[in-house]
Image (tube, rainbow, N blue to C red):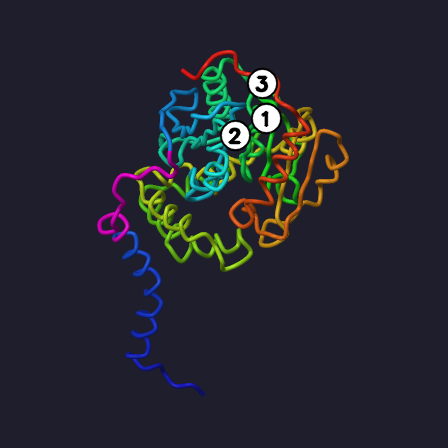
Amino acid sequence: MRGPSHPVTRKSGKALALLPLAAAGAWIAWSHLGLNRAGPLPPALPGRRSTLRTRAGRVNLYAADAQGGRPLLLIHSVNAAANAYEVKPLYEHYRGHRPVYALELPGFGLSERADRIYTPRLMTDAILDAASEIAGRHGGVTLDAIALSLPCAYLARAALERPDLFSTLGLISPTGFDARLSGHGPADTNRGKPLARGLAAFPLWGRPLFDALVSRPSMRFFLEKTWGSREIDEGLLAYDQLSARQPGAEHAPFSFLSGYLFPDDTTRVYEALRLPVFMVHGARGDFVDYRYVGEVAGRPNWTILRLPTGAFPHFENRAAVTNAYDAFLAAHPQQNQPTASIR
């Protein structure tokens, strides 16, 4: 028969039970009052910067446009700390050969980070307005455009709505060919969960939750999953840390975490594309499910490349990506050449 527990033992047990709550409270207080925020975010890329006023708000656009030729628009991925540094290898490679631009989507990088719900519609409008601005700067020429991961779906929708703006599309590790995020849902819908966003963005714990998500160990963990290796790009990690500490950095990721940025009709959008499409993806890491790529793989307008890399192959093997992309472009020669110089 077990005797009565000792008072000290009972008190110790209660104290231990309260430790997680105390730790959470301490982290919330530290996040709100003591955690250092970064200073102004330095540019992720060289070249000129301009702020475009779009239907989606103010967005940041990098430009290296001293060269002639058909413009190339680059679009980063969407994650907790996304920004234009993610396209840096491609931007630096092409800036000496052709006009190249890099757009930072609403809620990320040096673009406006308003407290609102971010949706595929918002992102698509930003891409369309940026593409229209770039085309106008080059006398009405059509663009080549490359997007990473989830924004591949936004770019594809933009091309369906305004095919006159685009000459070719490039999709790097596109979301939407996997079992979880493919879809033939109603047009222009998303998977947003209001309750999930409300809980994540609750003022008391919202920013502390985000700060934990973008801590250096956490971000390294997620980048290693993206790479499928511990050999990540340290410059990207460092810049992500600066970007994630900016005021309002949590707002767009809260929409991402609660499903609002995931279209429900991605597969339908990809299947509707008629422009030439270049697609490349890796074979390593957590983003290698392309089980439904066969729906488009046999089509004459699709060129698909699989590399022994993670989900950011342009960081790991830039030459393989750019050589294949250049061969793809050579097979789809330039049309609608510029008729005027850059404004």
Using residue 208 as the reference point, say whether residue 71 is left or right of it: right
Q: Earlier in the sequence, mark 3 or mark 1?
A: 1
Look at the numbered disc 3 and give the secondary structure of its residue. loop
Q: What's under tag 2, amino acid-wise?
A: Pro
* Residue topped by disc 3: 162
Is the residue 193 above or below the residue 31 in the image? above
Q: Nearer the viewer, residue 294 or 319?
A: 319
Tag in front: 2 or 3: 3
The image shows residue 226 at horizontal and vertical percentages of: 53, 51
The disc label shown at residue 157, or none: 1
* Residue topped by disc 2: 120
Mark 2 near mark 3, Cβ–Cβ under 8 Å? no
Q: Distance from label 3 to label 1 (Cα)?
A: 9 Å
Q: What's under tag 3, amino acid-wise?
A: Arg
Q: What's under tag 1, amino acid-wise?
A: Arg
Look at the numbered disc 1 and give the secondary structure of its residue. helix
Label count reads 3
Mark 1 near mark 2, Cβ–Cβ under 8 Å? yes
Look at the numbered disc 2 and give the secondary structure of its residue. helix
Quadrant containing the N terminus is bottom left
Q: Which residues are magenta?
A: 30-46
Quadrant containing the C terminus is top left
